[in-house]
Image (spheres, grey):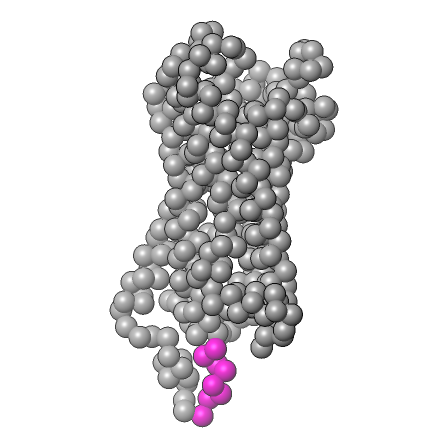
Amino acid sequence: MMTLSNNSSLFPETNNRTLYMEHTIAVYVWTFVPPLIITLGTVGNLTTIIVYARPSMRSSAFAIYAVALAISDTVALYSGMLFDWLMLAFDVNISFRSSFGCKIVCWLVYTSVCYSAWIITAITVERVALVWFPLWSRRRNDKKFSKKLIVSIFVFCMLLNSHLLYGIVLDTRQSIFHRKCNTVDESYQIFFQHVWPWITSNVFCFVPCFLIITCNMMIIFKMLKGPNYTCRSYRPNPFSPRNICMKDQRTVIILPLLLTLNTVFLITTLPLNIYLLILKFTDVLVSDVYSKKETQNYLCWTILNMLLFSNNAVNCIFYCLSGSNFRKELKAMCCNKGFH
């Protein structure tokens, strides 16, 4: 995330760090990797929005989640990675021109990261409900329920991070060329550095990951238990219309894509949060002289940040690899033909 976060102390203003190879590698990573991730994410998320907005795709509830996730991922890339890239690679602080810019950028990156995590979690939890309670799923409107859910998640993430709009300000004590975002007062600084990191780690990562892992185990267990997804299993009687089981068939079809998205989310988000947790436990401090160990911490943090933001850029690739309907629709769109 933004360098204002709890790990900002890993790179103080000193020239000693340039003596170590780890810092040179980190500089190269920050210079060349972010534009690739941002470009890939922009193209992929835009493609996702266009494909799932097509008439033959937008009828499903998953399309609503996918579009919301693509928008949130794009906001995360531009409010988080873009500003970090410009600042750490080129020392260009676009958001640090006013307190308003500091507040908005910081609030956007935290809200979008939170929103993306909980959209993936919501998709997973809903699939568990559809697999375990198919009768309940047929009694509700999938699209209407999904719209209400993503709005509720957005309001939750927005309110959870709303304190940033108060507590983050521009530090005017520095010269105009070295101003950075800072906390409004000492009490908020204590909260931001010692309490807020624990909240974000749990709410943005550990709790969603726990739910995702648990839900995936429940889905796999149900699937291994027996072939419960046929039309015959869900049709109350032989004279029931065939389309009564269509929703259940779509649930099974989308499971490979869901499991792929969940796996990618776990692989890309857990390492950085676990690493920051380890730093807290080991009480890593930064002295006036930048040590080799601290430079190694910075390089490790840099690489894990690239991994974290790659989660906001690669979902479209996995839609293509795991989603047969997505591939067909994308091919039809590229060939300028309708798909039904």
Percent across and percent down for residue 10 are 47, 19
Q: Say whether residue 115 is left or right of residue 207.
A: right
Towards the viewer: 5 or 241:
5
Write the residue at 51% across / 73% down.
Answer: 139
Q: Residue at x 44, y 32 (%)?
A: 303
Along the horizontal axis of the image, is 145 left or right of 123? right
Q: Which residues are magenta?
A: 239-246
Q: Is residue 5 visible?
A: no
- Residue reaching furthest to the bottom: 239
Q: Name above or below for residue 185 compared with residue 39.
A: above
Q: Is residue 50 visible in this depiction of the protein?
A: yes
Q: Is residue 39 rendered to the left or right of residue 122?
A: right
Residue at 43%, 74% (x, y): give it. Answer: 249
Q: Give the x, y percent position of residue 149.
A: 56, 56
As for residue 17 lying within the magenta part, the answer is no
Residue reaching furthest to the top: 288
Tell me if residue 261 comes above or below residue 82 in the rendering.
below
Q: Nearer the viewer, residue 77 or 182?
A: 77
- Residue 241 covered by magenta stretch: yes
